[in-house]
Image (cartoon, grey):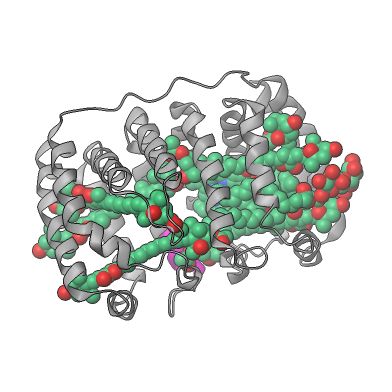
Amino acid sequence: DQIGDAAKKLGDASYDFAKEVDWNNGVFLQAPGSFQPLKALKAIDKMIEMGAAADPELLKKAADAHHKAIGSISGPNGVTSRADWDAVNAALGRVVASVPKQKVMDVYDAVKDITDPKVPAYMKSLVNGADAEKAYQGFLEFKDVVAANQVTTASAAATVPTGDKIGTAAKALSDASYPFIKDIDWLSDVYLKPLPGKTAPEALKAIDKMIVMGSKMDGNLLKAAAEAHHKAIGSIDAKGVTSPEDYEAVNAALGRIVASVPKQTVMDVYNSMAKIVDSSVTNNMFSKVNPLDALSAAKGFYTFKDVVEAVQ
Ligand code: DGD
Ligand code: CLA
Ligand code: PID
Ligand code: PID
Ligand code: PID
Ligand code: PID
Ligand code: PID
Ligand code: PID
């Protein structure tokens, strides 16, 4: 297709730049400017809306392309192969083309709003500047091909199951865990801190398992989960906490996407996360909330998971 061909030209223009970026640099975990959690949440909300509007099949293919690209990483900078670099760009270009232009621009504008204007120049200072300019020129040509293949109307909303066992169980889980949710400091910057003693390649291994799980999920249910998060963001209070109803809808939606993949795929995520999150992290989280509320939430989760497993 045209986007695939254009991605090859983009690769010609940008792979030198890709090789020069230190993908293992811890700076990419930081906020791209001053820490503004509510504005950042707004930007993520725009990404969620864009994701929910995208073609689910193209999203899955894009996830697969990333998984494959992780497998061809080489060298100290963590760069993927030329062929996989092109395949990722092509897959993301197709995702972008599957949503109306305005949804893409809304993401750009919202991310711009939390990005310090000095950030692009700083990024450029870490690589060969001429290669960055060549890459950007390539992006400008690529985006014209994407725009020429772009849809003009959004896809239909997801169908949300009703009266299912997971929906019923989500009510009980939400009742048991909402007090805990209210105890958590959602606006803290602790969640952007590096995991103690872990390197980027180690963290990437766990992310890879999530990407694989995402690519196996039922596309309609994944879309429904994105829509539920978007709705929940719309009802947050000043401390970032969503309403009990929207919280319940998020739990139900997540239970359903978990049930749509094989158990082992879920356990692969859990086991790989357990390798990078040591008990100092969980204990620190636990120390900041009411312990009885946390225990009630945990009990609710372990009951909920049996219902999910039964329909998995
Ligand atoms: C950039 C963009 C990269 C900056 C990286 C910041 C992104 C941080 C994302 C954090 C999000 C949080 C998610 C994580 C949450 C974790 C939860 C625990 O360097 C601009 C200005 C605005 C920049 C900020 C907006 C960036 C938006 C990027 C996409 C958003 C998606 C991000 C998703 C993140 C998550 C993914 C899953 O656009 O951009 C560089 C540009 O900066 C440079 O400016 C451009 C001008 O816009 C353009 O008009 C033009 O002037 C151009 O062109 C210069 O510069 C000139 C000529 O005109 C060209 O013809 C050509 O010759 C060129 O020069 C060659 O040099
Ligand atoms: Mg990504 C984007 C890393 C998995 C879907 N992703 C980005 C970039 C960053 C990144 C490179 C955001 C920061 C930025 O804009 O830099 N993703 C990244 C990693 C992983 C991952 C490390 C781990 C596996 N992503 C992942 C998965 C999905 C996505 C699983 C779902 C399928 N990701 C996704 C989307 C988008 C990203 C939809 C974006 O739109 C965003 C992005 O790239 O926006 C431009 C700048 C970008 C780069 C350095 C890489 C692109 C290089 C272009 C083609 C040429 C360079 C131009 C110029 C020099 C800089 C960019 C300017 C900008 C205005 C365009
Ligand atoms: C400028 C000036 C003009 C010239 C110009 C110009 C540039 C405009 C630009 C630009 C626009 C632009 C847009 C970009 C958009 C990037 C969008 C990224 C979206 C990320 C998402 C993440 C996610 C997911 C995901 C799916 C999940 C939901 C999420 C489900 C259902 C300034 C050059 C025209 C770069 C969507 C993918 C996993 C949230 O206009 O003179 O330069 O860049 O998890 O959804 O699972
Ligand atoms: C524009 C203007 C509107 C019209 C429009 C428009 C277009 C927007 C577009 C577009 C946005 C867009 C985004 C793309 C992003 C591509 C990002 C590629 C990333 C590739 C990576 C590869 C890799 C790896 C990996 C992880 C490793 C690092 C690597 C570590 C830690 C402008 C059409 C709406 C194409 C990250 C995955 C293995 C490098 O908005 O008017 O057209 O395209 O090895 O991580 O090692
Ligand atoms: C300039 C002027 C214009 C011309 C121009 C220009 C240059 C702009 C540039 C540039 C922008 C730019 C951006 C780059 C962005 C790279 C983003 C990489 C993201 C990598 C991540 C990696 C990671 C992980 C991971 C999970 C870990 C955390 C991490 C945990 C819990 C100035 C040329 C346009 C290079 C996200 C995945 C392993 C961080 O604009 O005239 O030159 O470069 O380790 O999670 O540990
Ligand atoms: C233990 C001991 C036994 C008793 C026991 C026990 C506990 C086991 C547990 C547990 C397992 C477990 C699993 C959990 C899994 C969480 C998985 C999260 C996945 C996240 C993903 C994120 C993503 C996306 C997304 C889609 C994108 C890709 C991504 C596309 C196509 C120890 C109780 C049995 C909690 C997938 C969603 C946006 C990456 O066994 O005695 O306690 O918890 O962006 O994909 O867009
Ligand atoms: C298990 C054992 C195997 C069998 C199995 C199994 C089950 C795994 C499961 C499962 C995993 C799982 C995960 C669930 C997670 C639910 C998470 C809910 C989150 C809700 C949030 C709501 C909100 C917001 C929001 C953003 C705001 C904060 C809030 C800010 C900054 C165990 C079956 C495989 C159900 C976060 C979105 C508005 C609070 O693996 O043997 O069954 O379920 O307002 O952010 O303000
Ligand atoms: C213990 C002992 C057992 C019993 C037990 C127990 C407790 C465990 C616990 C606990 C675990 C736990 C975990 C918690 C996790 C909360 C995660 C919140 C994430 C929030 C985020 C928010 C954000 C943003 C956002 C984007 C911004 C960055 C942020 C940018 C660029 C010990 C009870 C089981 C509470 C990610 C979205 C706005 C950070 O196990 O016997 O009690 O709690 O602002 O992006 O700015």
Asked where in the image residue 145 lies, by quadrant, the reply is top right
The answer to whether residue 34 of the structure is visible from this angle is yes
**Residue 29 image point, x, y percent:** 56, 66
Residue 198 vertical position relative to residue 299 in the rendered view, above or below? below
Residue 110 vertical position relative to residue 205 in the rendered view, above or below? above
Quarter the C terminus occupies: top left
- Part of the protein shown in magenta: 200-205
Q: Residue sitting at 42 percent across and 24 percent down? A: 157
**Residue 297 image point, x, y percent:** 19, 61
Q: Residue sitting at 24 percent across and 38 percent down? A: 256
The answer to whether residue 208 of the structure is visible from this angle is no
Asked where in the image residue 245 lies, by quadrant, the reply is top left
**Residue 295 image point, x, y percent:** 16, 68
Asked where in the image residue 32 lies, by quadrant, the reply is bottom right
Q: Residue sitting at 27 percent across and 75 percent down? A: 286
* Residue 294 shown left or right of residue 26 in the figure: left
Relative depth, front residue between 277 and 234: 234
Relative depth, front residue between 36 and 75: 36
